[in-house]
Amino acid sequence: MSSGTIDIDEFEDADPDKFEERNDTERIVLFLDEHDNRAWKAATIAERLGLETDAVSAILSRLKERGLVRHKRPYWAITDDDERLQSAYRLHRHHETADEQYGEERLEELQTDEMEQIQ
């Protein structure tokens, strides 16, 4: 798919949202959720998704802080708290919908003279 084209049969057989662009965090969560019967090393997740290992490790650490993944060195797995995962997904979709309806917030536009400079 990196060439900008795919086989027409792949196109015809795909789910409607298969080719929608997802950010790296979404891709990692979806990967772990789809493979919830296994635990993975960060390097393996990175390889499977075509991402940098350091980036995957950083994202997994943030997801762990939110309780969305479990970690036992060196392995990572999706949370077994389905309610927490569904709640996080609903919140994410809510933010996406708000961005689509009202546009994304830009912190620099919200800044006042009294606020510290945003870098």
Image (cartoon, rainbow, N blue to C red):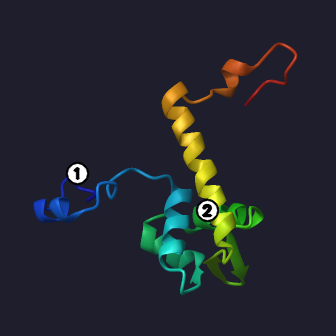
User: Mark 2 or mark 1: which is in front?
Assistant: 2
Please name whichever residue, 8 or 51, is drawn nearer the observer in this view of the structure: 8
Disc 1 packing (10 Å; few <14; some 14–19; many ≥20): few
Please name whichever residue, 7 or 3, is drawn nearer the observer in this view of the structure: 7
Marks 2/1: CA–CA distance = 33 Å
Please name whichever residue, 88 or 108, is drawn nearer the observer in this view of the structure: 88
- Label tally: 2
- In the rendered image, residue 41, in percent from the top left (x then y), is placed at 59, 81
The N terminus - image quarter: bottom left
Residue at 69%, 27% in the rendered image: 107
- Classify mark 1: helix, strand or loop: loop
Whether 19 is drawn above or below 118: the answer is below
Residue 4, label in figure: 1
Residue at 67%, 62% in the rendered image: 58
- In the rendered image, residue 108, in percent from the top left (x then y), is placed at 68, 23
Residue farthest left in this picture? 8
Residue farthest top in this picture? 113
Whether 109 is drawn above or below 85: the answer is above
Q: Quadrant of residue 115?
A: top right
Residue at 70%, 77% in the rendered image: 70
Residue type pointed to by label 1 = Gly
Residue type pointed to by label 2 = Gln
Residue at 54%, 33% in the rendered image: 99
The C terminus - image quarter: top right
Residue 86, label in figure: 2
Name which of mark 2 and mark 1 comes first in the sequence.
1
- In the rendered image, residue 19, in percent from the top left (x then y), is placed at 32, 55
Residue 14, label in figure: none
Whether 98 is drawn above or below 8: the answer is above
Please name whichever residue, 116 or 6, is drawn nearer the observer in this view of the structure: 6
Disc 2 packing (10 Å; few <14; some 14–19; many ≥20): few
- In the rendered image, residue 114, in percent from the top left (x then y), is placed at 88, 16
